[in-house]
Amino acid sequence: MKTSPWFTLALGAVFIFGVFVLGISLFRLQVLNVADYKEEQAKQTFRTVRVPGMRGRILDCRGRVLAECRPSHSIRCYLEGFRQRGTSSNTVAAVDVALGRLSTLLNRPRQVSTRQIEHHVRQSSAVPLVVWRDLDDEAFARFCEHAADFPGFEDFTDTERVYPYGELAAHVLGYTGRGDPESQDETPIYYSEKEMRGRAGVELYYDSYLPGAPGLRRVVVDARGFRAPVPENSADGDVPPTNGPDLTLTLDAAIQLSVERELRGVTGAAVVLDPRSGAILAMASAPTFNPNNCVPRLTSEVYASLTNAPAKRGQNRALSESYAPGSTFKPITALAALAMAWMPEDEYDCKGVYRLGNLRLHCWDRYGHGPMNVRSALEQSCNTFFCNLGTAVGSNAVISAARAFGLGQKTNVDLGGETSGVVPDDTWKRRWYNQPWYPGDTCQMCIGQGMLLVTPLQMAMVAATLANGGKVYRPFLHARSGEARPSTLIRTIPFSEESIELVRSGMKDVVDIGTGRNILVRAETSPQTGRRTRYRLNVDCAGKTGTAEIGRGATKRKNTWIIAFAPFENPTVAIAMIIERGESGGKTVAPHVHNVLAGIFGETVIQSGRAAMPGIEGRD
């Protein structure tokens, strides 16, 4: 059959057109789009590995190191050295066998399971698998001696968090753990290991500040994702990590140690503030814990010790636990009344019990104090006087005064985990108890009992506000560089200078001649000689004792308080301390507060002999 010339011509035209199209496609592929394909090839050839920077140190206000990073000896496994033919399970089995042999050599249990190996082979085969972390010196030295017998394994030194002072300021510092950071880049990022992350305390609150800037390292991989030999100039795109900045706190380790020493063996909390700025000089909670036990990882046993009742060692009672303040609230009641035209010289005759309908509220002096004014009632901590005072001026005045000091709301301290406490009113009581507000509720609140709840940090703010003449500062821990005394003034309490000074004078009487005499003077008896020595603080101070009764029957107990500031003129320190299940603020807490203030200002022997020191009468 003869082929038509037109068909031959058409077939030739189609062939020529096809060659033309193929040429254009090759031109686009090899010339115009070559950069795009090189980029895709690079993505398949290289893996970007994130290299963490060293976490910054945490320092106290005098430069003492409270937290830093220490060398940590570890062993990692390069999976390409164990790659087997066939499925990935063969590679997993090879690594598993080698790990068993190495575990026997080190005489240490394995830290990586077969399932973890399998997950790493499938997801992150380009980067080494850390099989032992934070080895002790003996095991690490044993591996180094036999490293040639275990090809595919490599020793390396990383960093782990360490707290040089152990338990000191544990609730403030917190602790760290390990976790993957969130990638903000669309390019897949692989991690050579999990990075150090804050889990509690300032480690958590400043977790975005402390870490160093991570670096990036490019790793060459083959078609199956395993690491391949490194070609020349492969490190040209690497970015080295940088160390994180130091975080300087307002804490003074010496004051912190003194406070924690006074809380040993009890359950309680204490906060020391600088009333001129709100800087936290010390914050302690007891019982405490050692954050080094949380490194390199938080085990289930340690976690249970931190959270289980009744100790709850991980709870920072200074700001996450709320208590009835007892008589330490009475200075606020006094200011509320003075603002409502109650005169300083106005008196109330204390007969030992306050009657309001069927309510009976007893004073600690069963026979009564007799005529009392504001200043003498503060000195003697007279319950009936303040019950009458609250009834006279009304609940709204007392509630407003409490909220002016910052009670019933979070202080917004830079730490986290804070509770707001409760300043109850009619709306709050109807919401939670479905009951109206009664006059007896006002009486209870005015003496720091009932539904009123505060934190030790809030009461330290009350002491600081009275110390500085009425300024409410936001408490803070981060001592910002370049500022001698960074502070945030929240408000000034709406009371006259005369009223504040009257209350301050009453609080000085508490320490000089009242229920808080053990704050100013302590007595010590030598067991060898039997001689009694009395020591007095080197400065004058002011304070208020408090005892809050909670529970009923067999569960009835007392939480004992002190708030204080010193020196009386131009105060530089304000303190609040609570000890649970005590006897009274004057007997239980005051000696501990004396020791803290003596550590700051010193003390002087004022009497030495065999005569016994007069007992502290009364309670608060």
Image (cartoon, rainbow, N blue to C red):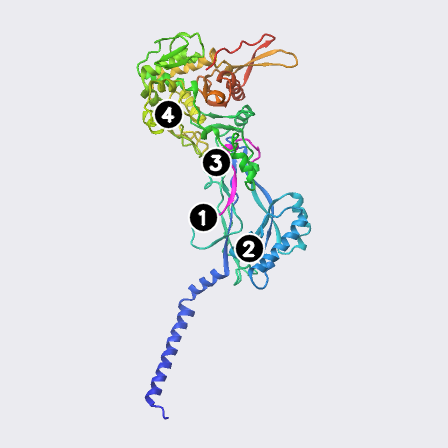
- Give whichever of discs 1 and 3 has the lower sequence position: 1
Which residues lie in the magenta part?
163-180
- Please tell me which residue lies in front, 439 or 119: 439
Instruction: Give the Cα distance between marks 3 and 2.
Output: 36 Å
Say which residue label 1 marks: 182
Instruction: Give the Cα distance between marks 2 and 1.
Output: 23 Å
- Please tell me which residue lies in front, 536 or 551: 551
Say which residue label 3 marks: 202
Task: Tell me the kind of residue under disc 3.
Answer: Val
Q: Position of residue 285 (x, y in %)?
A: 51, 28
Task: Tell me the kind of residue under disc 2.
Answer: Glu
Considering the numbered disc 4 on the image, is that residue within a helix, a strand or a loop?
Answer: loop
Q: Where is residue 377 in the image (x, y as percent from the top left)?
A: 40, 12
- Residue for point 64% across, 52% down: 100
Instruction: Give the Cα distance between marks 1 and 4.
Output: 40 Å
Say which residue label 4 marks: 423
Instruction: Give the Cα distance between marks 1 and 3.
Output: 20 Å
Q: In which quarter of the image is residue 455?
A: top left
Asked if the residue under mark 4 is in contact with the one under mark 1, i.e. CB atoms within 8 Å, the reply is: no
Considering the numbered disc 1 on the image, is that residue within a helix, a strand or a loop?
Answer: loop
Q: Residues within 10 Å of mark 1 (few under 14, many from 20)?
A: few
Please name which of the two marks, 1 or 4, marks the residue nearer to the observer. Answer: 4
Say which residue label 2 marks: 118
Q: Where is residue 230 in the image (x, y as percent from the top left)?
A: 56, 59
Considering the numbered disc 3 on the image, is that residue within a helix, a strand or a loop?
Answer: helix
